[in-house]
Image (cartoon, grey):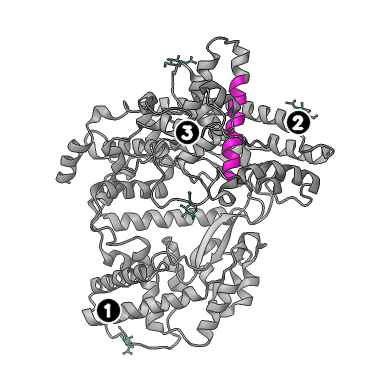
Amino acid sequence: MSHIAYWLLLLLPPLLLLQAVGCNDDALDASKAPCDNFHEHACGNWHAAHSLRALGAHDMRSKLSALSRQQLVQHFEAGGNEPATQLSSFYSSCLGGRQSLPSYMRALQQRHAHWPLLSANATTTSGANFDWAAAQAALRQFGANGLWRLLVQPNWQAAEQRIFYLLAPSFEQLGLGEMSEFLHERYLKYLLLELKLRVRRAAALAAQLVQFEQRLRALQSQSQSLVLHAPQQLQQLAAQLPQLQLLRYFELLLGARYTPQLLVVADIKYLEQLQQLFAAQQVDELIGSSWLLLQLPTHFELLRHEESTLAEQRVQCLRLLQQLLPQPLAALHLRLLHGSAAAGAQFMQRTQQRLQTLFDSLKLQFERLLNATQIFKQDADTQLLALEKLRAMRLLLPPALPTELPTVKAAAAAGLGYDEQLLQLSQSQAQQQFGLALDCLQLPCEAPPDHALGPLDVNVYYRLKQNAIELPLGLLRAPLLDAESQNQTLRLLAGLGYMLAHELLHGFDYDGINYDAKGRIMDASWPPRAIIRFGLRANCYLGERYSNATLTINENIADSEGLRLAFDTYQQQQQLLGSGSGAALATREFFVAFAQNWCGQQPAGASGQHASHKERVNNVLGNFPEFAEAFECKPGSLMHPSQQCRIW
Ligand SMILES: *[C@@H]1O[C@H](CO)[C@@H](O)[C@H](O)[C@H]1NC(C)=O
Ligand SMILES: *[C@@H]1O[C@H](CO)[C@@H](O)[C@H](O)[C@H]1NC(C)=O
Ligand SMILES: *[C@@H]1O[C@H](CO)[C@@H](O)[C@H](O)[C@H]1NC(C)=O
Ligand SMILES: *[C@@H]1O[C@H](CO)[C@@H](O)[C@H](O)[C@H]1NC(C)=O
């Protein structure tokens, strides 16, 4: 522990903690002309301090998360005057980083006595003595998976019901290239050496394990549309696949709560092929069971991070805390951010009201647009459906009063090391997940809201199948939500307002228009006339300004139309306030504040559905005549293109 305290002094001078937030004017680079490249103008001087970069800050949003991490790290590592909680005890044992394989082996042996590899006389056999169902259930009780992956997810169609999904394993560690396969094999060899196998034997067995996993991977079906499969009852599925002993697997997994009526969506193709592999007696018992045995330490990444830096370890330990103790971590985060639990709770209550008001004003503005648009001309029914969907759209906010666990007599004193705590917490988390599915076998049911997102998450999500926008706790802090800022409305609308509007528009992009107010795929989708009118306008987002346009179109629609909504809402509110001469200045400030949501870089290797930060900012603002006017950009300059896109 002593070297940690030392590093703390170097990395985290306590007073620097929150000062860096909120002064975005530092990011502005006035030497860059706004009409040439507005992203550079607004963000040219943006940077994150070294200590924050080490905790993952590479752009505005990740900086917020890094600030929250920094505060938590400081709290945990300063230690001293607070009694130990489960959080702090887990964090320090995690950071201590001493893991040992025997804990994991013990945990598995206690639940499933016979593991051929662990008995001294193990040789290659191919009988049918190994208890596959018991072994896989033992793994899953700790959150790890075996020959199949078991998830608890919202229902395939509506979202009010959580059900089980049986899928092919993810094969994440094996990866897809020669390099990752080589590394995986070496990793398995290390684990086997830890189990006291001799070098040559460990190397040979590791190679066989990788081959085995490659064979499993080859069984994967390509169908990605599982999400559209209707669920079936476990007993039906089990009857189709008798060799896999699914009934026994679930019985062992769920104990007293087991019922063969539980609902499953299964990757039947994969499971059938798996069954054939077994039927043809092609699974060597020693190899198959050893592969399963190593899934547990692999799941917990035992020994994987030997060479990671202290900062990486901190990030990893906080990630585990958020995953395994989400509620207490949220409560601690609020307490640290606001000084006391009561102040944190007050902040959350105020925030809920504020965001609801903000969201309502965005919805009202979009309703005006839906009423005025030509897209629904002669299609009043469709227009009505769109209005219904808009009105039904909800905000999912973190609970106002997350509960912090009572303090514990230091877990270390109770003799629990990191591995034991990790296993215990994972086990109770798995039980909770299973409970969510079992509580809700029949519809209608009152599923508790799914707040999977915590203080370290800083992204907003539109949940298509719930017609709801989910905001994680991590976003609800300065500078996005400042207690007392002079131009609150402006900052709020250009920040969280734009983000909410972006998500709202996902309900009305190329995917969104196929789902109704309840998040169900529409029986009767839009009539062709409306779709064509929509498409003619959306086409603009496929223009040459957009790279990877077909991939990023929905995001570009949400970005540009979302900012339109936030901007118009802001204008409305300004008019109500009757501000006159300051209006031009305020307009410029609004656009700067919007652009500064996207200061910094995406992480290396991130691509996919979002354009780069620079492109997002410049392309969105290029669509605003108000922008060109406010900054006096000449037609034809980058920021004032001839073609300006707008659907709604
Ligand atoms: C291996 O040892 C176990 C006890 O550890 C015993 O039950 C089993 O019969 C032995 N198997 C062989 C093949 O000798
Ligand atoms: C939009 O149109 C509907 C139906 O005509 C009407 O009830 C509603 O008040 C209008 N909303 C706004 C904001 O004008
Ligand atoms: C917003 O606040 C800043 C100072 O914090 C001030 O310089 C600026 O004029 C304000 N803008 C508006 C539109 O009130
Ligand atoms: C376009 O997409 C590909 C694949 O996702 C990515 O590698 C590339 O960087 C993207 N290009 C741009 C300009 O974003």
Of labels 1 and 2, the one closer to you: 2
Q: Residue at x 44, y 53 (%)?
A: 429
Q: Quadrant of residue 625?
A: top right
In x, y percent, where is residue 269? 59, 73
Circle 3 packing at 10 Å, graded few (<14), some (14-19), many (20+), is some
> Position of 577 compared to 522: left or right?
left
In reply to whether residue 560 is colored magenta, the answer given is: yes
Whole-angstrom CA distance, mark 1 to mark 3, is: 52 Å
What is the C-alpha distance between the residues marked 1 and 2? 69 Å
The answer to whether mark 2 is within 8 Å of ligand 2 is: yes
Callout 2 environment at 10 Å: few (<14), some (14 to 19), or many (20+)? some
Mark 2 falls on what kind of element?
helix
- What is the number of callouts on the image? 3
At numbered mark 1, what does the secondary structure look like: helix, strand or loop? helix
Q: Nearer the viewer, residue 148 or 220?
A: 220
- Tell me, for residue 203, which label it has, or none: 1
Give the labeled residue for mark 2. 371
Q: Can the viewer see residue 359 in this picture?
A: no
Which residue type carries mark 3?
Leu
Of labels 2 and 3, earlier in sequence is 2
Three-letter amino acid code at the position of disc 2: Asn
Q: Secondary structure at mark 3?
A: loop
Magenta part mainly helix, strand or loop?
Answer: helix
Residue shown at 51%/70% (left/top)? Answer: 249
